[in-house]
Image (cartoon, rainbow, N blue to C red):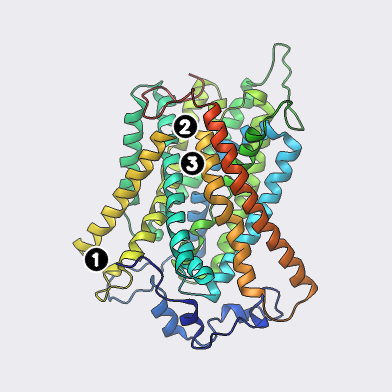
């Protein structure tokens, strides 16, 4: 069975194979030109091209989310593991460079997310990064981005399994072999991934949002009381600039962890595809970006200010043993649910690819066969995530490697290419020239993060590899 987006860009545009007109640019005086694309299409054609649109009476209705539900799912997917690594990244880089990077990366992520929404409006058939890759680069772009995004999801799922084991070791004082905790986390995540629509996950996501806010607040209050960064003289030494003797790979790994904190873009096409009204996506995006930028800055600065050089990653390990157990207990929901959202979207990518072109519309049916296919894909995905979590047992390094390999392109680089595809033709203005330079910078930043970040993450893993062994029962919780 062919695993590709059969609908091509020319199918969406119609028989006219000409490039986009100037009316399609993001700086047009009439932005509705993009929203009304495809040029020669109509609502019936859009529905036929959109694999998430139901064509079976009484079947699964995927396009069922309103904007706030999409916003909650986006927050649950994005604000989770990334925030737990930020205080340690701030300690590595210093407060001034750290704050500048958090704000700058947040602004870039906001803009690139907006471009993804514009690209989806231009090509309604796109439901994943793979389909977008097909529009940009043809068959091979579809395949490379398809498997790249699936691996990215599996790596993130593995990060959540690893964090689940750290949480359980912290709460139970290493009450069981770490491998057992990872297996339990994998099974629990698999069960919560089984609903087939994101609307169901949006209700879980509310609990995830409350969970991460509660866990971070408890940690900040705890470290402000115990002040783990205080020296014998009672003074907490906080640096405004990078620590002396900082190695290149450690510094760049800290930057990669900040990039990972904004790495939700890979799922945006899927989220838009399950919105009842895709034009509501900017509202959901604004909710996400206002939430994550604010929380990231407050958490990174406050925890580092009181923990100093003793700040841990995940950040919850910086608190006292009792507070740490409470914080991890509150964080259970976000540790599990955020991984579930990524697992759901990753499995949905394969599920849609396998079933979307079947004449019996199995994709939308409520039958044992359709449920069986979904269960098999979800199970295989979580099995792969468990293997990755066991093979790369260091939290910081796993996030850094994941960010370098995938997040750099999905968050920054590809959005720059989307803009180029939409706007290179037509009339040029000063605003359009500025956006051209900005998107060139996005692509360049992605390339640098990919090349240098991958090297730095692997070098750091080799350098510190003796501290944690793969497939080990050893306690991986900090402060033990």
| Quarter assignment of residue 122 | bottom right
| Quarter assignment of residue 93 | top right
Q: Residues within 10 Å of mark 2 (few under 14, many from 20)?
A: many
Left or right for 207, reference 352: right
Q: Residues within 10 Å of mark 1 (few under 14, many from 20)?
A: few
Instruction: Give the residue at mark 2.
Output: 328
x and y percent of residue 258 in the render? 62, 43
Q: Residues within 10 Å of mark 3 (few under 14, many from 20)?
A: many
56 or 459: nearer the viewer: 459
Q: Is residue 136 above or below residue 221?
A: below
* Distance CA(mark 2)–CA(mark 3): 10 Å
Q: Quadrant of the N terminus?
A: bottom left
x and y percent of residue 282 in the render? 59, 65
| Quarter assignment of residue 197 | bottom left
**CB-based contact (under 8 Å), mark 1 and mark 2:** no
Instruction: Give the residue at mark 1.
Output: 366
Task: Give the residue drawn at x 75%, y 77%.
Answer: 428
205 or 479: nearer the viewer: 479
* Distance CA(mark 1)–CA(mark 2): 37 Å
- Of label 1 and label 2, which has the lower sequence position? 2
Mark on residue 211? 3
Circle 1 — which element? Answer: loop
Task: Give the residue drawn at x 69%, y 15%.
Answer: 231
Q: Residue furthest top?
A: 232
């Amino acid at each position: 069975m062919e695993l590709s987006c059969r609908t091509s860009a020319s199918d969406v545009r119609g028989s006219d194979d000409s490039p986009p007109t100037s009316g399609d640019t993001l700086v047009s005086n009439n932005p509705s030109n993009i929203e009304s694309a495809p040029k020669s299409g109509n609502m019936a054609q859009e529905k036929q091209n959109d694999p998430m649109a139901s064509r079976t009476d009484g079947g699964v209705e995927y396009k069922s989310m309103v904007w706030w539900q999409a916003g909650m799912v986006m927050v649950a997917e994005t604000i989770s593991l990334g925030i737990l690594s930020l205080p340690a990244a701030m300690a590595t880089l210093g407060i001034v460079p750290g704050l500048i990077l958090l704000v700058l990366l947040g602004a870039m992520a906001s803009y690139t997310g907006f471009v993804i929404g514009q690209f989806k409006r231009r090509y309604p058939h796109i439901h994943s990064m793979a389909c977008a890759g097909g529009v940009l680069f043809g068959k091979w772009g579809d395949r490379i981005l398809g498997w790249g995004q699936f691996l990215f999801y599996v790596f993130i799922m593995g990060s959540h399994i690893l964090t689940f084991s750290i949480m359980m070791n912290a709460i139970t004082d290493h009450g069981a072999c770490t491998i057992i905790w990872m297996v339990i986390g994998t099974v629990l995540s698999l069960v919560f991934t089984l609903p087939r629509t994101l609307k169901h996950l949006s209700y879980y996501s509310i609990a995830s949002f409350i969970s991460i806010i509660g866990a971070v607040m408890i940690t900040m209050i705890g470290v402000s009381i115990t002040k783990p960064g205080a020296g014998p003289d009672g003074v907490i030494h906080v640096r405004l600039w990078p620590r002396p003797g900082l190695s290149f790979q450690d510094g760049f790994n800290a930057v990669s962890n900040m990039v990972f904190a904004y790495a939700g873009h890979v799922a945006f096409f899927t989220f838009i595809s399950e919105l009842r009204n895709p034009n509501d996506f900017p509202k959901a995006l604004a909710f996400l970006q206002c939430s994550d930028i604010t929380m990231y800055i407050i958490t990174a600065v406050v925890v580092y200010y009181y923990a100093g050089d003793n700040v841990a990653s995940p950040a919850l390990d910086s608190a006292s043993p009792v507070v740490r157990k409470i914080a991890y207990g509150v964080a259970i929901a976000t540790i599990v649910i955020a991984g579930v959202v990524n697992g759901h979207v990753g499995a949905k990518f394969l599920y849609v690819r396998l079933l979307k072109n079947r004449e019996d519309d199995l994709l939308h049916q409520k039958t044992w066969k359709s449920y069986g296919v979904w269960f098999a894909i979800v199970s295989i995905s979580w099995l792969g995530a468990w293997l990755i979590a066991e093979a790369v047992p260091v939290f910081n390094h796993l996030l850094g490697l994941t960010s370098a390999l995938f997040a750099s392109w999905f968050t920054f680089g590809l959005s720059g290419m989307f803009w180029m595809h939409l706007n290179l033709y037509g009339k040029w203005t000063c605003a359009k020239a500025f956006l051209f330079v900005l998107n060139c910078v996005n692509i360049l930043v992605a390339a640098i993060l990919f090349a240098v970040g991958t090297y730095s993450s692997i070098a750091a893993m080799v350098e510190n590899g003796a501290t944690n062994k793969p497939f080990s029962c050893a306690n991986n919780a900090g402060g033990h």
